[in-house]
Amino acid sequence: METSAVNPFGTSGSTAKQEAAVTGLTDNFDNFLTILTTQLQNQDPLSPMDTHEFTNQLVAFAGVEQSVRQSGQLDQLISLNRGNEAMGAVSYIGQTVTADYNEFNFNGTDPVELSYTLPKDAKSAAMQVYTSEGDLVTVIPADKTAGNHKVTWDGKTLLGEDMPEGVYSFQLGAIDENEEAVEASYQTTGKITGVEYTPNETILKAGDVPIPLSRVLSVEETAGT
């Protein structure tokens, strides 16, 4: 299993920030009470100070402190949720997932089915395959009717040359009767071989293809396992 140096369960950073904020508020509040006490002790008995203003400031201080503490608790809940997500991601290893994604592994030999969905009919449509560096490999005629479709790539370039194994991506170019682009959605399928934890998201690894856990559409038992 692949993991990064990031600890998905860690909360020390958020906790330290919260404690520092609360400490700062406490110091300011102590100073405020000292000033308030001094002012009350030295106020003119014939012209007493307005107590409403002091009350408002006390309420404001209390409200800010409560907000800081609630923010810290929310950070802890988010961290706990990330931890549960990270542990659950391990169960994907060995499973075959279908994801809302447009990258795939090519083993250098077997043709690959590229899946896409058109939200409406298009006047023309063609599937484009790219290398991991973004270089165009080939263009394949594609079904232009609304719905789910698949295009088979034989692993060759436009000139008929064989491409090596590696990670590739695909994108559908489609326009409607008004010459406006029709945005397709994509589906890629792969066997999960590892998990990678990043500061913001849990990533499933299908070979060399990184699939964000949030993009997974379905999970199935891998054939033959």
Image: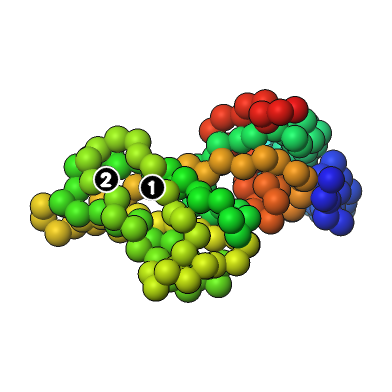
Between 53 and 153, the one nearer to me in the picture: 153
The residue shown at (39%, 42%) is 150
Residue tagged by mark 2?
143
- At which x and y percent is residue 172? 35, 55
The residue shown at (60%, 59%) is 108
**What amino acid is at disc 2?**
Asp
Mark 1: give few (<14), some (14-19) or many (20+) Cα within 10 Å: some
**Is 107 drawn above or below residue 113 in the view shown?**
below
Residue tagged by mark 1?
151
Asked if labels 2 and 1 touch by Cβ distance under 8 angstroms, the answer is yes
- At which x and y percent is residue 97? 61, 35
Q: CA distance from mark 1 to mark 2?
A: 8 Å
The residue shown at (76%, 36%) is 93
Q: How many numbered marks, from 0 up?
A: 2
Q: Quadrant of the C terminus?
A: top right
Q: Is residue 174 visible?
A: yes
The residue shown at (34%, 47%) is 184
13 to the left or right of 132: right
